[in-house]
Image (tube, helix red, strand yellow):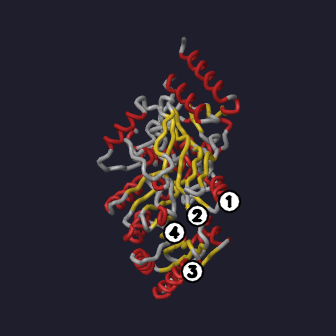
Amino acid sequence: MTANEQIDTGWSGIQAIVGTTGIQLAQEQPQDWHDRMNQVLSQPQQLQWLVSPHSPEALAEVVACAAQNRWKMLPCGAGSKLGWGGQVAGVDLLISTARLNRVIEHAIGDLTVTVEAGTRLADLQAVLAKAGQFLAIDPTYPAQATIGGIVATADAGSWRQRYGGVRDMLLGVSFVRSDGQLVKAGGRVVKNVAGYDLMKLFTGSYGTLGILTQLTLRVYPLPEASQTVMLTGDATAIAQASQTLLNSALTPTAHDLLSSQVVDRWETGKGMGLVLQFQGILPSVQEQVDRVLGLAQQLGLRQTLVKEVEESALWQRLTELMQLAPFSEVITCKIGVQATGAVRSLSELEKICDRPIRGRVHVGSGVGQLALLQPECSPEMLSQMRHLCQEEGGFLSVLQAPVALKQKIDVWGYRGNALDLMKTLKHQFDPLHLLSPQRFERDI
């Protein structure tokens, strides 16, 4: 059998598995999809097909067929974060879990939910809300993001202050190995210990170890009341307010530091900003808000209090301000800095760029995001910014950037001592390196 005949046979096999509705031509996808593909693929013209299996079993068959033909695969959900990470080499097949979108089980009394990986977060939240519950994750693209994509990229937001990161939500996972075998780990209880902690291992793995099919997560009751306070003003006063609040007994759901450009575009004041959300029973929320407002008055900071419908609009606006357009010219970085020095770190990062930048740091964890435009930020500047973060004991990873820039820089910039272990795990889970090759650190 010739190589072309083998390819035709393979494609016929995949079409038999997913049907004509499960295969789409890459060239027929919308322009923003192509923009993301151009950032993640080193040879985007090589990719011709998008395959969307309708069940975990069908997905396993597709992966097994691809493995038999030694086809390299790039897994995704809705594709909202396809542009994140390193450039993938020689991909033959893009596999989407978008059709795996069922809510399998919602154990209301146990505060757990089991869903397929392609379930959109927005759809899941609507289901949970009917039972007075919610999933405490607020990712970058809340309207488009799927649960599998959120876990694969470890994409948590401001709520990590109160509830922890994505890995803290996971109780169990199911996934397809690179050879097409379905695997399950964990369950519906908190304590599941046997071999690797696959929930943590797969969180932030960017599809390099397997393709997630089903996830079990813990959920929380919807809060009775919610209010948000935004403080703006001089950087020194903002730093003092943030430190005081960190050392206090207050329990904000979110505690975010905002750069001066975000505050300016938000049109809520001048200088740097501090935005805090409090949720729970109304008396507790009101008391904590009053204490924050009193502190702000002492420090001479401008105060803005919002609640109910206006509060949702405020957080949506903040999300939009961190997403610049056009997509093809945006540089998005994930950073880590010392929580106690977050104000200083943002100020120093702006000095390196010699202009205001859009920055946001979740103060409790020190994790944050930067949004830049390519003309304003060179590879040399990114290198200096990374050095600054690393000197502070943190990191800077370039998630999204124009292709020309990604080709000139080390996207991840990891300098820890776990690289050999990560490569060993990759080889154990994917010995032929067929899944998302080179998307992760150092060709993993």
Position of residue 13 measured from the top left corner of the image (x, y, whole percent): 61, 22
Residue, x 39% and y 71% (percent of image)?
Answer: 344
Q: Is residue 309 above or below residue 61?
A: below
Residue 441 marker: none
Secondary element at tag 1:
loop
Left or right placement of residue 66 versus residue 409 in this view: right
Question: Of marks 1 and 2, which one's residue comes earlier in the chain?
Answer: 1
Secondary element at tag 4:
loop
Residue position marked by numbered label 2 in the rendering:
221
Residue, x 39% and y 59% (percent of image)?
Answer: 385
Nearer to the camera, 43 or 62: 62
In the picture, the quarter occupied by the N terminus is top right
Amino acid on which the number 1 mark rests in the picture:
Lys
Q: Is residue 295 above or below residue 353?
A: below
Residue position marked by numbered label 3 in the rendering:
283
| Mark 1–mark 2 distance (CA, rounded to whole Å) | 11 Å
Nearer to the camera, 443 or 138: 138
User: Would residue 138 be seen by someone viewing this image from the given angle?
Assistant: no
Residue position marked by numbered label 4 in the rendering:
253
| Mark 4–mark 1 distance (CA, rounded to whole Å) | 22 Å
Residue position marked by numbered label 1 in the rendering:
130
Position of residue 50 measured from the top left corner of the image (x, y, whole percent): 62, 34
User: Would residue 241 be seen by someone viewing this image from the given angle?
Assistant: yes
Residue pushed farthest bottom?
Answer: 298
